[in-house]
Amino acid sequence: MLYLAFSEYFFQTSSFAYYTAGAFNKTIAEETYSYFNISTEIFGSIIPEVAKYSVTPYPVMLKLMATETPLISLQPDSFTLEIQGSMEVFAVLPDSTTQSLFTMNITANTSIALNIFNQKLMGSLCLNRLQFSLTHSNVGFFEVSLLENILSYILQTEVIPSANAKLSKGFPLPNLANVTLTRPHITIVQGYVLISTDVHYNH
């Protein structure tokens, strides 16, 4: 039996690397979002202030950006990642210029499920909770709770899958000469992830 341990600091360092590489930033535009047409008309049907500001329907572009290094927490049987970010919503005008509608702060609490495949430790995000606050608006003040359902849906269908595609590359486990890890088991405890595994020696 072989035991491998990955500390919370290891994952926090990885989180910082992803953050500095812009892995948590995402631009969503009408031509890249396949579930429905995101437009000022859609937002205007939810927020009257947008309907008054933009009478003519225009496509909408969303720019999401992490504003600080996402925070990792390892507790017994729990691996969470909290992301602090901002989202700016733009109307895309006919001449391809953009006009900012409003900007929001976002706090996303996610959990990470771990698995091992091809000698790599992989993770997948699941969105647990979202919090929004309005930081700037060119359309006037509105209740951000009105947007909770549509923004949660966009994050679930676009942002989380995009993040999981990057996480699917995984972290290579220590490569021991002529050794293959078999039947690995992952346990999350306070402050670290423990992998216990049998090994197969390749002669």
Image (tube, rainbow, N blue to C red):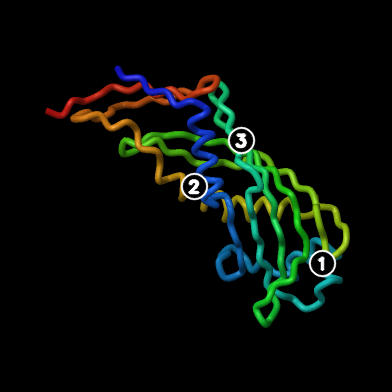
Which comes sooner in the sequence, label 1 or label 3?
1
Left or right of residue 150, residue 139 in this image: right
Q: Nearer the viewer, residue 137 or 124?
A: 137
Q: Secondary structure at mark 3?
A: strand
Q: Nearer the viewer, mark 3 or mark 2?
A: 3
Q: Residue at (37%, 34%) from the top-left corner?
A: 116
- At label 3, the amino acid type is Leu
Q: Nearer the viewer, mark 1 or mark 3?
A: 3
Q: Quadrant of the C terminus?
A: top left
Q: Secondary structure at mark 2?
A: helix
- At label 1, the amino acid type is Val
Residue 33 location, quadrant: bottom right
Between the residue at mark 2 and the residue at mark 1, the CA separation in whole angstroms equals 32 Å
- At label 2, the amino acid type is Asn
Outermost residue, left side: 203
Residue 13 numbered mark, or none: none
- Measured from the top left, where is residue 167 in percent x and y? 46, 44
Residue 64 location, quadrant: bottom right
Position of residue 90 relative to residue 94, above or below, is: above
Q: Residue at (83%, 70%) from the top-left corner?
A: 51
Task: Report how many numbered discs are placed on residues in the image.
Answer: 3
- Measured from the top left, where is residue 2 in percent x and y? 31, 19
Mark 1 highlights which residue? 50
Q: Secondary structure at mark 1?
A: helix
> Looking at the image, do the residues carrying marks 2 and 1 touch, with CB atoms under 8 Å apart?
no
Residue 56 visible here? yes
> Looking at the image, do the residues carrying marks 3 and 2 touch, with CB atoms under 8 Å apart?
no
Residue 71 numbered mark, or none: 3
Residue 164 numbered mark, or none: 2
> Label 3 neighbourhood size at 10 Å, few (<14), some (14-19), many (20+)?
some
